[in-house]
Image (cartoon, coloured by chain):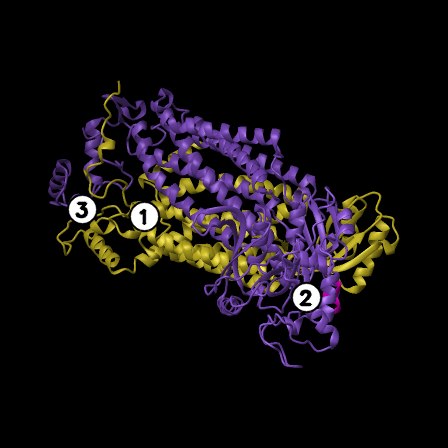
Chain colours: A purple, B yellow
Amino acid sequence: MRTLVTLGVMIVVMAAAIAAGITWSKATLAPKLALDLEGGTEIILTPVPEAQASGQVTSTTISQAINVIRQRIDASGVAEAEIGSQGSGSTAKIVVSLPGTPSPETVKLVTTSAQMEFRPVLQQSYTPVPTATPTPTPTSSGTAGLPPTPSASSAAAAPTPTATASAAAGAAGATPTPTPSASAPATEGAGPISPSDAAYYVTPAVQKQFDSLDCNNVKNRSGGVNGPANAAFVTCSQDGSSKFILGPVELQGQHIAGASSGLNILPNGTTGTEWVVNLKLDGQGTTEFAKTTTRLVKETAPLNEFAVVLDGLVVSAPAVNDIIPNGQAVISGSFTRTTAATLANQLSFGSLPVSFQVESEQQISATLGSEYLQKGLLAGLIGLVLVVVYSLIQYRVLGFLTVSSLALAAVITYLVITLLSWLQGYRLSLPGVAGLIVAIGITADSFIVYFERIRDELRDGRPLAAAVEHGWSRARRTILVSDAVNFMAAAALYVLAIGSVRGFAFTLGLTTIIDLLIVFSFTHPMMEIIARVRFFADGHRLSGLDPRRLGVEGVRYAGRGRVVVAPKAAAATDGHGTAAAWPTTQPAAVGLPGETIAERRAAARRAGTATAPSTSPAHDERPTTEGEQH
Amino acid sequence: MAAGFAQWGNDLYTGRRSYDIVGHRRWWFAVSGVLVLAAIVLLFAPGLNPGIEFRGGSEFVVTGVVNRDQQKAVTAVAAIDNREVALVTNQGSNSIRVQTRQLGSNQVEQVREALAKAYNVNVNAVTSTFIGPTWGADVSKKAVSGLVVFLVLVAVVMTAYFRNWRMAVAALAALFHDIAITAGVYAAVGWEVTPATVIGFLTILGYSIYDTVVVFDKVRENTDGVIHQSRYTYSEKANLAVNQTLVRSINTSVVALLPVAGILFIGAFLLGAGTLRDIALALFVGMLVGAYSSIFLATPLEVALREREPEMIALRKRVLAGRAGGSGTDGEAVAAGALAAPLVGPLRPGAHQGFAAQPRRRRK
């Protein structure tokens, strides 16, 4: 009884949550549909022109990119997306179809290449923040700080003497000369001593580019492609607050073994309030990173900093205080929960081999049309009606318990799917609908197994209440193990597969859990209640639990000292008749330990008439000994 | 009808009527073997016919369309290439996207002209391009790796639960049998294999294992402690279990197949080609074969494996010796002409049935 109430409360809570979601949030009454049923947005991505020109775009890079994009989308929810290529060779494009109208974050998740690099900082200067204007709109800030003059940078914390000195020295000749701040003097014409060799990398051209770079201009902060790996690279930070000259790449993003987002951990071990991305480097990455930090820790600011560059912009540039030998790095920056999660997601599935830009974004209709869903549902409905008719024929009034359990399962499934489509972005596709219809079979099977076990117990001569109890303890085991196997299938596929297989696995797992929930918290408690109703307990002809129909003939113990005598069989078999039929059918051995008295007597009698022919094979067989023996 | 069915169920349960399913196992093995062989041949000879989602194909975009009746495009494409039905999607506000299997350059031109004519636009308004598969090799690879893990897990869990690896082996053999035959039927029918079909196959996988586990659990229950008695052989006890679950198997199969049959009927006859038809065919065949295999293949196979165990051979000898009415080696005597078919009930009559079997005291 208590479980019934719990179940009711659960349903009400879920319904209330949906109602609340509709009122105050963007939940919908019907579950959201997937691409094949609802249509969505088709985004065509073209590789950026530089990549196309340099011949980087091959069918291999396109299929790599497709793989990465698919993993990113899958990791962000269970929305089923279609990703494919279009065209071939250097003109190849990627077509991403997402259900519904994707948010800008989703589009960004798909399009950004997430190429991450670690580079040493050679020079840094803070952008003069246009504090003069109280409202820094993009236009006003653009005019305010257009040319960041040397005086402006010297006003900032960054050490500008280096910059001016190297600029002056660089003006003298094409070959770089050592600057006063350089840690080691470089000989003329020789290669760089280390990636931090500012004297080698900061050429006049680079310095000029750095000086003229304006990070207040939004255009300069849109990101793009990382610079060449073995040369200096001038860029802004993501928020535009500072600009950098960076040395050559020290560590490539492909050495990142995994990434996760979370709140930062303070030195005293407690959790802070800032969102960070935690990186785990692979073996080679760990060695290289340890080497870099060993070198940088000896340098002075800003040369002791390394910059985390993502898609051409500096995410953060922490100073190295310690050597990091274990390959664990934390990137902090101006992250929110979503941006940290997005970056971690992008980094853990690797970067796209080339950068892409959105060529077009347009609405597409459902591939299947609305009539498919209607007809599909109609088909399911017809099937359900047939199931109802069949179970009523098979189980009579008891069939109503099957039907109501199935109806309840349908209600719960609907509620859960609606909730998930609101909270998790779950989308129902046509294969999903088919999966739900198949679930009818698996759910109904639990009831059938249960009812058949009860009937078996009735055939053994138990009264209904005992039969329910016994049948349940046996059916429960079967239901549990078979559902466990089914759930395992779903879990394995969900964790390991991608694309629409994942969506299917989710539906399968969901229906399996709901099946268990219904059987344990509705069907069985209801059955226990039913067993107390006289209509069922006395085995009415239409109850589906009529012992006479189940082959129990003659005297049947009905509990509480009462005995039911079946009218049909009453004349044929009384207690003695049963006993007379008994011995001939029971091939018990003589003298076996643990025999009943009746058995021993029967064996003795048999021994007396050993030579007599046995009775016909179609004799009456008594299934068990209990009940009637008393 | 129902009364007869119930009576039949009773007879099956009590063992009064018993179908010797396990005893005739050579027949079932032969039938299944032939079916699987035929299926494998079908998988090679006509072979499966993968759809656009797996192979890629040609895509046409018609722009400037006023009346976006999708059927026109399907008809236009079918007139040129009728092997597969085109996928039509509305795009943006006034264009239409048509995807077909990969066509030759001749056919591409023909389709462009046909589409232009159908939608009453200039041929130049119809662009064509090749598209790659949306269900690429990487998706399949991941799906297969998921599948392998699933099968290993199933084998391990079944071995642990039934405390016998033979049940797991038999269940996996039945699973292979179901999938092979379903794929064979699919190849024979020649319908396109779409992602929906694959999903259908995966569903069968789950269903087949599920069905087999239910039957095996009854076998486990019946054969519990089988070696501690001398009346019935393992196969007789297992056969009784199959007979006793026959009613449940039939009921479950009917209940599970009715909705699928509904979808198949509507999908194939009212809607024509499409996701519904693909998935429903795979499911219908798979569930039917799955129900068959759980009764006629999995259990007999398991029995065949079990009967090779030395303990079971000894049991069989003991039982047969007892039945012969002679003096068994262990001194057991059984009445001559005793039943071949096993009886229901405890193996040792008169055993305590537990307190739950006692009459209840009336609650106040």
Task: Report the disc number at residue A200.
Answer: none
The residue nearer to you, when weighing B237 against A173, is A173
Q: Chain of mark 1?
A: B
Where is residue A534 shown, x and y percent of the image? 35, 20
N-terminal label among 1 and 3: 1
In-image side of A56 versus B305 (left or right): right
Q: How many marks?
A: 3
Q: Nearer the viewer, residue A619 or B125?
A: B125
Q: Is residue B189 above or below residue A470?
A: below
Q: CA distance from mark 1 to mark 3?
A: 28 Å
Q: Which residue is mark 3?
A: B335
- Secondary element at image label 2: helix
User: Which chain contains the residue that carries disc 3?
Assistant: B
Residue B294: image location, x then y, percent: 42, 50
Dot 1: few (<14), some (14–19), or many (≥20) neighbours within 10 Å? some
Left or right, A285 with respect to B64, comes to left
- Identify residue type, mark 1: Arg
Q: Find residue B268 and report its horizontal and vertical position in percent.
A: 64, 45
Residue B220, labelled with which disc? 1
Quadrant (top left/top right/bottom left/bottom right) for the C terminus of chain A: top left
Residue B258, image quadrant: top right
Give the quarter of the figure containing the N terminus of chain A.
Answer: top left
Q: Nearer the viewer, mark 1 or mark 2?
A: 2
Q: Which residue is mark 2?
A: A163
Name the foreground residue: B254 vs A270: A270
Residue at 58% across, 34% down? A381
The magenta segment is A49-55
Please say if A506 is above or below B315: above
